Each structure stands twice: as structure tokens, then as C-alpha cells.
């Protein structure tokens, strides 16, 4: 028999971001707990609002299945003497298992026969197990930050007020820091603050709805979407799509209620990003565009209650937004009174990192590097790249970015336009921050792209140079994201850029700041970037062996390595790939540990080795041409033509013969084959 299981943890308001992570992690955590205790179930759903986390498992078994536990003791030879009598080892094992010798038996295993015992363990009731484990489970729910309250040892996202735990219609009895589990829950803090009884898990969501609590976060999101659509029709605009904001506001309320307000037309003189940022990041408002794509002087707020007087609620939100936009308008107008370049000098007073110096010093370093990159990769844009690098951090000292930090880069672009800077420079100032997130937009022009690479590599090398390397979840300078940004920009812009040389130059520019050995830093930085590159590709479904096989032959030329990986990934789906791989590994096994040898054609006596040598000579020339043309798939297909000759060689020829010269010559032939393949990938890694 099976019944539904429900656990509700009632709390003070939990931050929206904490809930998002809990919804992602708790299904697996509960599944692991139930699996460990052999409590079969059909499915798990995690729900929650700012004031509660609810875990629901359908058709959880009433009790564990019985099982037989097998315990092994000494081997048969040790357990019995030559006459078949039990030894002290057997007697001691029986005593340890609290069993008689008659209870023991010989159990056959892969390692041989052992004395052992099989015990039947009767399954326990699920409710008894849950009563024991739920307190520990609750205490071990991870959050970004936890807190303690009163004099309790318990740490949780926010203080816990009630615990509801049911298996079917029966309360799961346990206590946690003075709280006792029961079947009572609480309604909406303002619209239905009374507690209510949950008789069984199946009625939980409906009872919450009656108490003005939409406990299912997906249902709340759908309600908000519908309300946004209704307002769109009402005002004749389109809500700017923002799934992250939708997720946030859905986790800020228990009963969503949308309302539309407006602001004065004069504020539309501000750049769109300023208005959207002020509404989105600070007030959690949705913005709207009109039919022509222009921002409308309207906003939508999601309230946590059904207001008795909606007009009063809207007026209050308008008043708050008006004050924030007035501040933004003042800062914007003040900043425009001077050219953007005016702010550059002020960067000398901004510390980027204590050991690495000011933002101005950092800018001078990556400006030098970006200009040198432009000279190699985009000579026509060299002056614009230099100008972009000079100005790209200037807005950090503007009043607007001082108030709205999220607008760095955006305001630099707008102020550059107002100062009459070249459009490429203005755009590059904004784009040098890209990408700002995994899968985010990339720079569209060399100005932003080259400055972005230079800025990011300066940060990575500088941090590694003073020992600020990412550890676990700690990455205060976002070095992982910066490394991925460099990778994506190089591949997107198809830059023929040598990473080792890039790191070397960054180390030269940082020489006066870092306190570690440059070669050590260089090795760690390249390995760090390689790790991000590998993880990124394997996350897209490319086997790790394919990536590692290519990277083992070289990583400095990232674009080239990427093309080789694409070719190898295509090539490995050939019908004969596995057979070719076996042949190559056979080659590698034979030459493993052998010193480097040179082929002497005059020592080739067997017909099979002569044929292999001739075929290798033909294939090597064709491969060289394909590789020079960067057609790595063609190179691999050409290499595959060696397989029949390699197979025939192994069928007809003994490599490890007594004649040392002949043996070394045959090893040299196989080494040449391995070297040919390694121009694209080390197949032994696959």
C-alpha cells in the first residue's frame, strides 16, 4: 500500500533567489533521502512561497521491503582446517554476527568461496523512518546564506514558524528546536492569517488557495503572465519579456495581483536602459513598449495582495518611481555637462584591487595589450581600439553609475555618443563588458571584442599572479566567466590568436604587480582556460575524450583546436571509426616507452612493411596539404586510408624481433604513423 507524503516548512519571508535554488535542488535531495532508506515513490514535487517550502511525494510506500543482508567472513580455506572443522576464525565470525555455526554457509563470490551469513531484515514502517530523518533533512537544506535565531543551534534561511508533516492522513511525529510537527498550516499573512488544518496531502493545494496562497510557483508564474497579457490589451502595449524578473516576482508573493501605473513623459529623455533598470532592478516593475517599439511611460507592478483600493496602490508605486527617476534625471544631466574623457583621470582614485592597483593603472595595461592585438588582428581599427580602451571604464566615475551600478558600460556608450565619439568606439565601450552571462550576447565589432579580451586576460593573469584563484564556489572576480568570455569571443570573431603569447604579454605588463613566478602563473592560467573550454564543450554533448584528444596536441591556438574538435567529432561517427581507433591504440601500445627512432628505408625487408611505408608517404603528403588548408576532416579521412596497410602490417610483421636495427626501424615506422595522427589529435585519449 502507498500514500502521499507532504512536508511543509513555514517560515519568515525567504528571499526570492533562495527559493529559486531550493526549487532546483530539493527534488534531488528528497529523492536521495528516500532512495537511501528504500522508500519507493512515484514522483516528487517541490513547491513554495516566501513563507513556506513544501515537498510532496506521491504514492510513497507504507513500509520498506524486506531484504536479505549478506555478510562475508573469512575465506573457506581460512574458516576450515584440513579435516573440515571450523577454525578460530570461523568461530569468531559467528560470535561477531551473534549466530551459531549452523547459521553460517559457504557463499561463492568472484574472488572465491567465503564463509558468510544471510540475515533477513524486516522492512520498517515509512512513518517511523521519516520521523527519524526529517529533522536532519530540514537542517541540511542548503541556502546561499543561513541564519540562527533566539538561542537555537538550528540554521535556516529564515526563522521557522511551523512544521506540517503528513503521510496519508497520519501526522509524522517529530520535533525540531521547540517546534512539533502537526497538520496545521497558515494562510496569507494579510488576507487570511488564520491557521487551517490539512487532513491529507491531496487537499493541500486547494486549502492553500482558499487561504489566498498559491503555493505552486508554476501556477503563480502563469497567473502573472495572464495578468500581464490583460494589461497589455488594456494599455495597448507589449510587456518587455523578462523571464528572470518573472521568476523573481513570482517568488516574492503568495497571491500575485498586477497593477499598471505611469510616469511623466519628461523622463523618456533618459536612455531606455536607465528607465528599465530603475524599474526592474530597484522596484521589480515590468516595462512596456508601444507598437513602434518605443518605451511607454507605464510600468506594471506585482502586488502580494488584492488591494481594496487599487488606485491608492498604484499612486504609491508611482510616487516611489517618480523619486527614483528624478534622481536619475538629475545625475544624467549633471554627467552630460562634461565630456566622457573628463572621468578618465578620476579612475586614478578608484582601487581595482589592492595589489593590482587602480582602475586607471589597469586601463593603461589592457589598453596597451588591446592596441597590440589590434595591430595583429585588425590594423584598420587600431586607433579606435585604443580610444575604446581609454574610455571604456570612464563611466565608473559618473554620477549615474555611482547610483545605478548595473548601468556601467551602458552609460559609457551614451555619454560617448553625446561627446561625439566615433560610433564604433561608443558601441565598443558597452560591448567590452560582454558576455555578461553564460550564453549572453558577444561583441559585434573588433573595438569591443579586442578590448574585452585584453581587459579579461589582465584580470585573470593579475588575480592568478597574486594568488586570487577561484576555489569551489568562491570566485569574487568572476574569473570563470571572464575565461569563458575570452573563449567565446575568440571563436565567434575567428581570431587567429595564440593564448600562450597573450598570457606572456599580460605577465610582462603586470610584472611590477604580481608576486609569483611568471612561468608558474602562465601554466596555471592556460590550464584554467583549457578547463573552461573543455567543460563548455562537454556540456554541449561533445565527449570529453574527443576534446582531450585534441587538446593533448596543443591548446595555444584556440580557433585551430576548435576546428580540430569539430572535425574529430564528425569523423568519429564513421562506421569504421572504432576499428581505426583500435588500430591506432595498437600502434601506441607497441611504441610506448620507446626512444625516438628514425626510419631507414633500406632496412624495410618485409613486403607488408614496405607497403605501409609507401602508403604512409602518400598519406602524409596529402595530410600536410589538408592541414595547411585547415581542412582537418579531410586530413582525418586521408589518415583513415592507412588502416588496411596497418592491419596487414600487424598480421604479417613481428615488430619486436631480435635484430635490434630491424626492430627499431619498425618502431620508427609506427612512431611516424602516431605522429601523423597527432597532428590532429592524440587518439589514445579517446
Image (cartoon, helix red, strand yellow):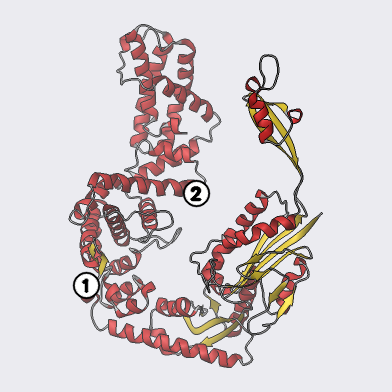
Which element is circle 1 on? helix
Please say whether residue 241 is visible from this viewpoint: no
* Left or right: 372 in relation to 245: left
Give the mark nearer the N terminus: 1 vs 2.
1
For the image, the number of numbered tags is 2
Left of 333 or right of it: where is 273? Answer: right
Crowding at mark 1 (Cα within 10 Å: few <14, some 14-19, many 20+): few
State the residue at coordinates (67%, 14%). Answer: 82
Task: Quickly name the residue at label 2.
Answer: 539
Left/right placement of residue 350 relative to residue 656 reads: left
Q: Regarding mark 2 in the picture, which secondary structure is present there?
A: helix
Task: Identify the residue shown where x is 34% and y is 18%.
Answer: 668
> From mark 1 to mark 2, how far is it between C-alphas?
42 Å
Q: Are marks 1 and 2 in contact (CB under 8 Å)?
A: no
Toward the right, the furthest residue is 1
- Depth check: 220 or 624 in front? 220
Q: Residue 254's quadrant in the figure?
A: bottom right
- Residue neighbourhood size for the residue with mark 2, other residues' Cα within 10 Å, grouped as few (<14), some (14–19), many (≥20): few
Q: Is residue 126 visible?
A: yes
Q: Could you tell me residue 87's position as x and y percent? A: 66, 22
- The answer to which image quadrant residue 50 occupies is bottom right
State the residue position of label 1: 349
Amino acid at each position: 500500500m502507498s500514500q502521499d507524503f507532504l512536508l511543509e516548512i513555514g517560515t519568515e519571508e525567504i528571499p526570492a533567489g533562495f527559493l529559486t535554488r531550493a526549487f532546483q535542488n530539493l527534488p534531488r535531495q528528497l529523492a536521495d533521502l528516500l532512495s537511501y532508506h528504500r522508500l519507493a515513490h512515484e514522483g516528487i514535487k517541490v513547491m513554495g512561497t516566501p513563507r513556506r517550502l513544501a515537498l510532496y511525494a506521491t504514492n510513497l510506500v507504507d513500509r520498506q521491503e524486506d531484504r536479505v543482508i549478506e555478510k562475508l567472513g573469512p575465506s573457506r580455506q581460512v574458516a576450515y582446517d584440513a579435516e573440515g572443522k571450523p577454525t578460530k576464525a570461523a568461530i569468531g565470525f559467528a560470535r561477531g554476527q551473534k549466530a551459531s555455526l549452523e547459521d553460517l554457509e559457504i557463499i561463492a563470490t568472484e574472488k572465491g568461496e567465503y564463509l558468510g551469513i544471510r540475515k533477513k531484515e524486516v522492512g520498517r514502517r515509512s512513518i517511523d523512518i521519516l520521523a527519524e530523518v526529517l529533522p536532519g533533512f530540514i537542517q541540511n537544506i542548503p541556502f546561499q546564506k543561513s541564519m540562527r535565531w533566539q538561542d537555537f543551534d538550528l540554521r535556516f534561511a529564515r526563522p521557522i514558524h511551523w512544521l506540517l508533516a503528513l503521510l496519508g492522513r497520519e501526522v509524522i511525529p517529530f520535533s525540531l528546536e521547540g517546534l512539533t510537527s502537526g497538520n496545521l498550516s497558515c494562510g496569507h499573512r494579510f488576507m487570511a492569517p488564520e491557521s487551517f488544518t490539512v487532513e491529507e496531502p491531496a487537499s493541500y493545494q486547494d486549502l492553500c488557495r482558499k487561504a489566498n496562497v498559491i503555493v505552486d510557483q508554476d501556477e503563480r508564474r502563469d497567473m502573472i503572465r495572464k495578468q500581464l497579457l490583460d494589461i497589455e490589451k488594456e494599455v495597448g502595449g507589449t510587456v518587455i519579456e523578462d523571464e528572470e524578473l518573472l521568476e523573481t516576482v513570482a517568488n516574492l508573493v503568495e497571491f500575485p495581483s498586477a497593477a499598471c501605473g505611469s510616469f511623466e513623459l519628461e523622463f523618456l529623455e533618459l536612455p531606455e536602459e536607465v528607465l528599465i533598470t530603475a524599474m526592474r532592478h530597484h522596484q521589480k516593475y515590468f516595462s512596456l513598449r508601444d507598437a513602434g517599439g518605443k518605451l511607454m511611460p507605464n510600468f506594471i507592478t506585482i502586488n502580494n495582495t488584492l488591494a481594496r483600493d487599487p488606485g491608492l496602490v498604484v499612486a504609491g508605486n508611482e510616487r516611489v518611481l517618480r523619486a527614483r527617476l528624478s534622481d536619475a534625471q538629475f545625475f544624467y544631466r549633471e554627467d552630460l555637462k562634461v565630456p566622457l574623457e573628463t572621468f578618465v583621470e578620476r579612475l586614478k582614485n578608484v582601487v581595482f584591487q589592492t595589489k593590482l592597483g587602480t582602475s586607471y593603472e589597469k586601463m593603461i595595461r589592457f589598453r596597451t595589450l588591446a592596441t597590440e592585438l589590434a595591430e595583429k588582428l585588425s590594423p584598420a581599427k587600431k586607433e579606435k581600439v585604443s580610444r575604446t580602451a581609454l574610455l571604456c571604464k570612464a563611466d565608473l566615475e559618473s554620477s549615474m553609475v555611482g547610483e545605478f551600478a548595473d548601468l556601467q558600460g551602458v552609460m559609457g556608450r551614451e555619454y560617448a555618443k553625446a561627446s561625439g565619439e566615433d560610433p564604433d568606439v561608443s558601441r565598443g565601450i558597452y560591448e567590452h563588458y560582454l558576455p555578461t552571462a553564460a550564453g549572453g550576447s558577444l561583441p559585434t565589432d573588433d573595438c569591443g571584442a579586442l578590448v574585452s579580451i585584453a581587459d579579461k586576460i589582465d584580470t585573470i593573469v593579475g588575480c592568478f599572479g597574486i594568488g586570487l584563484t577561484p576555489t569551489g564556489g568562491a570566485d569574487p572576480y568572476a574569473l570563470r566567466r571572464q575565461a569563458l568570455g575570452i573563449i567565446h569571443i575568440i571563436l565567434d570573431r575567428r581570431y587567429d590568436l595564440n593564448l600562450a603569447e597573450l598570457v606572456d604579454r599580460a605577465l610582462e605588463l603586470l610584472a611590477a604587480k604580481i608576486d609569483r613566478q611568471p612561468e608558474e602563473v602562465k601554466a596555471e592560467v592556460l590550464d584554467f582556460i583549457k578547463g573552461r573550454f573543455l567543460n563548455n564543450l562537454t556540456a554541449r554533448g561533445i565527449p570529453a575524450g574527443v576534446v582531450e584528444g585534441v587538446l593533448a596536441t596543443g591548446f595555444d591556438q584556440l580557433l585551430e583546436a576548435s576546428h580540430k574538435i569539430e572535425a574529430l567529432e564528425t569523423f568519429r561517427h564513421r562506421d569504421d571509426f572504432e576499428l581505426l581507433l583500435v588500430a591506432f591504440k595498437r600502434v601506441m601500445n607497441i611504441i610506448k616507452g620507446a626512444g625516438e627512432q628514425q626510419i631507414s628505408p633500406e632496412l624495410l625487408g618485409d613486403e607488408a612493411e614496405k607497403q605501409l611505408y609507401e602508403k604512409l608517404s602518400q598519406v602524409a603528403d596529402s595530410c600536410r596539404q589538408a592541414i595547411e588548408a585547415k581542412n582537418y576532416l579531410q586530413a582525418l579521412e586521408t589518415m583513415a586510408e592507412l588502416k588496411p596497410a596497418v592491419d596487414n602490417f600487424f598480421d604479417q610483421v613481428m615488430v619486436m624481433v631480435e635484430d635490434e636495427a630491424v626492430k627499431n626501424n619498425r618502431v620508427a615506422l609506427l612512431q611516424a604513423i602516431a605522429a601523423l595522427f597527432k597532428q590532429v589529435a592524440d587518439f589514445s585519449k579517446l
